[in-house]
Image: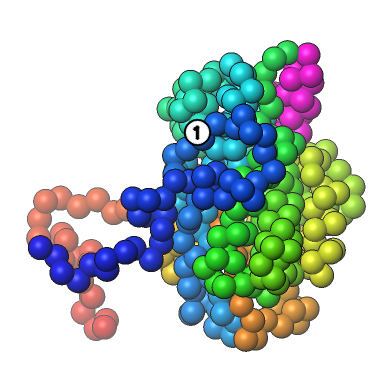
Amino acid sequence: MISNLPDKPSQPGRSAGYRGVLETYRPLLNIPAHTLTITLLEGNTPLIPMPRLGQELGECDLFVKFEGLNPTGSFKDRGMTVAIGEAAGAGARAVICASTGNTAASAAAYAARAGLRSIVLIPQGKVAAGKLAGAMAYGAQIVQVLGSFDDALNLVVEITRSHPIALVNSLNPYRLEGQKTAAFEICDVLGSAPELLCLPVGNAGNISAYWMGFQEYHQLKRTGLPQILGVQAAGAAPLVLGHPVDKPETVATAIRIGRPARGEQALLAAEQSGGEIIAVTDEEILEMQRRLAIEGVWVEPASAAGLAGLAAQVRAGRRAVRGQRVVAICTGHGLKDPEIIAQRAAAPVAIPVEMKALEAVILPKEGEK
Ligand code: F0G
């Protein structure tokens, strides 16, 4: 018998009684009564303390909410459990979305669980391998559009106007209802909202959902409100530039979006919270991805953008975070995009099955420590 295990895991998400975001927070979600519970026990992701990185970033009390630990590897599962549950309850037979990859994998998984057909439209050639494989594994019909994410989104919006296929992009309000539960969880774990929340911004649903969640929880429980720092990639930063970007480009393919569907709402969220939306370069994103990995948290590039933005602001003397509680949302797992690492890391050395060869490659050379 193992005696040093705690009686109760500190994260209810890992315990037998946990029932997913919909059942945990149903009274607080603005959803129709017909919404079914289609769950993979998403949510309740860990809020990981990052003392070393927090110190380095400006002596703040830093936590990473690791949303990559959701069932399909991204935060999308929170909104998808609700959107698919609603669609299934309303009698839908098929769902559709446009996606840079994570929404596709999540929609496919929850549709499969609900016994619905799923169709996902992806932009040409820019979807990370782990996401595409996920959508395939869960059985989606995948259609590659010879255009951008924004083009694909236009197509799915159009087709759902005239055909009985449910749209599960974050234009669907139930997606946001599910995603706002992440704000509730943060307040539940910390006891109140943090001073600052930073996160990546693509189609701008998630930042809108967080702000909605924090506001609603504050009304209910006086948990306070965070400033929100939304971060786009410099090559795909319509909300920073103030105009759409026709050919968005970034290594963070998840947020390679030029016309965010909820752009206005995102700008309002940032402004009302006293925060802002800024842009960071691909180099800054990849540097933060590396930095997080050294802490044992491997996220996909887009997921490092929030913290990269914070680091850039502190470096430029535009923000002081000393003594503040800061939560960074890391939206997707590093396994989603293995190629980005393989492209930049040296290939592993190969040796014959000989001790001398192993010694030669791993032991310090003569004169070295
Ligand atoms: N991070 C990751 C890993 C994402 O996949 C996305 C969006 C975002 C951040 C941005 O969230 O769009 O709500 O502002 N991915 C969508 C998709 C576009 O299709 O998977 P947002």
Is residue 169 or residue 316 the one in the foreground?
A: 169
**Badge 1 is on which residue?**
38
Residue 249: percent from left, percent from top: 71, 45
Residue type indicated by callout 1: Ile
Q: Is residue 119 above or below residue 291?
A: above
The answer to whether residue 241 is left or right of residue 307 is right
The answer to whether residue 162 is left or right of residue 304 is right
Is residue 360 or residue 75 the one in the foreground?
A: 75
Q: Residue at x 15, y 69 (%)?
A: 3
Q: Is residue 258 above or below residue 89?
A: below
Q: Residue at x 56, y 80 (%)?
A: 61
What is the tally of numbered marks visible in this picture? 1
The answer to whether residue 212 is left or right of residue 9 is right
Q: Is residue 42 above or below residue 269?
A: above
Q: Quarter of the image holding residue 272?
A: bottom right
Crowding at mark 1 (Cα within 10 Å: few <14, some 14-19, many 20+): many
Any magenta on residue 366?
Answer: no
